[in-house]
Image: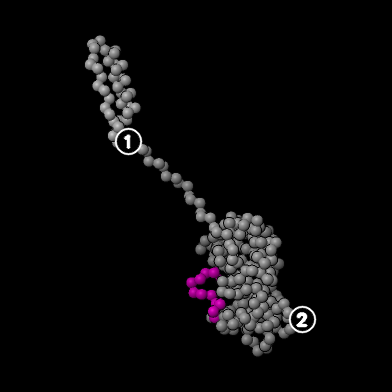
Amino acid sequence: MTLARLALAATLALILAGCQRETAAPAAPAKNTTNAAPATAAPTPQSTDTPAPPALAPVSDYVLPGALAPDLGVEQLRQLFGAGNVAIDERLPGAEGAEIRGVRLFGADPTRRARLYFQDSQTLRGLSLVVVDDPGSRWRLDNGVAIGLPLAELVRLNGKPLRFYGLDWDYGGIVTDWNGGALAPKDGDPVRRNARLGWADDAPANAAAPVGDGEFSSDDPRYPKQGALLQVDELSVSFPGEDDL
């Protein structure tokens, strides 16, 4: 019993004694409860709110895939790249002239610009593809491939010849097969790293290189100079599907 309750009990006893016909003995003095155990406090109810995800550190190095992952949404992208550098774009270019809703990073800066496509283009959920295609871009793949890399250097990094579609159509220049080289997809890695070839900046107008929707090899003897005539014009990374979100 607390000191307050003891004092209240003593006071009530005195009042009741005064109302009785016979004189009662004086009330006993209240006991010293200085060392009494405190009353047990009621347990604090536990919050049922889901804790907020931890904040993401801003990106300072432009590597693909780097911090990009399929579970990132617009708010997480703003944490990574700054709110003013993340813009929803209703008309990102797609295949065969299509326009797709997505996100554009650093729209005013060609050295950092990138296009982001999502599995659900309306809710912008499920990051599925990141594309970089500006000359001089600071973005690079984490395997060392960068915009402007000559085909000959790409083959050297791979350690083996590679295959690609001929130029000058919708899918022109896309590398289709790394032939098991160092740049080939690794077993168990769901992220695919892609490169697309185009004409080198200094390629002459009448240069001979593979053109059209056929598949060609980097060591095709019909095009002995293609290693210098072609270069990486586009980088992209593609992520797993909905089952992995």
Q: Is residue 73 at all visible to an observer of this figure? A: no
Quarter occupied by residue 80: bottom right
Q: Check if residue 198 falls in the magenta segment.
A: no
Q: Which mark is residue 38?
A: 1
Query: Which residue is painted at 64% across and 80% down in the image?
Result: 151
Q: Which is nearer the eye, 92 or 15?
A: 15
Q: Is residue 24 at all visible to an observer of this figure? A: yes
Please state the extent of the stretch shown in magenta in the rendering.
181-192
Q: Which is nearer the eye, 200 or 101?
A: 200
- Residue 118: image location, x then y, percent: 60, 62
Going by the picture, which residue comes out furthest to the right?
A: 205
- Residue 169: image location, x then y, percent: 70, 75
Query: Which residue is painted at 54% across and 69% down in the image?
Result: 191
Image quarter in which the N terminus is found:
top left
Crowding at label 1, few (<14), some or many (≥20) Cα neighbours within 10 Å? few
Q: Main secondary structure of the magenta part?
A: loop
Q: Which mark is residue 205?
A: 2
- Residue 175: image location, x then y, percent: 62, 77
Query: Which residue is painted at 60% across and 56% down in the image?
Result: 78
Above or below: residue 34 compared with residue 226: above
State the CA–CA distance, disc 2 to disc 1.
92 Å
Going by the picture, which residue comes out furthest to the bottom?
A: 221
Q: Secondary structure at mark 2?
A: loop
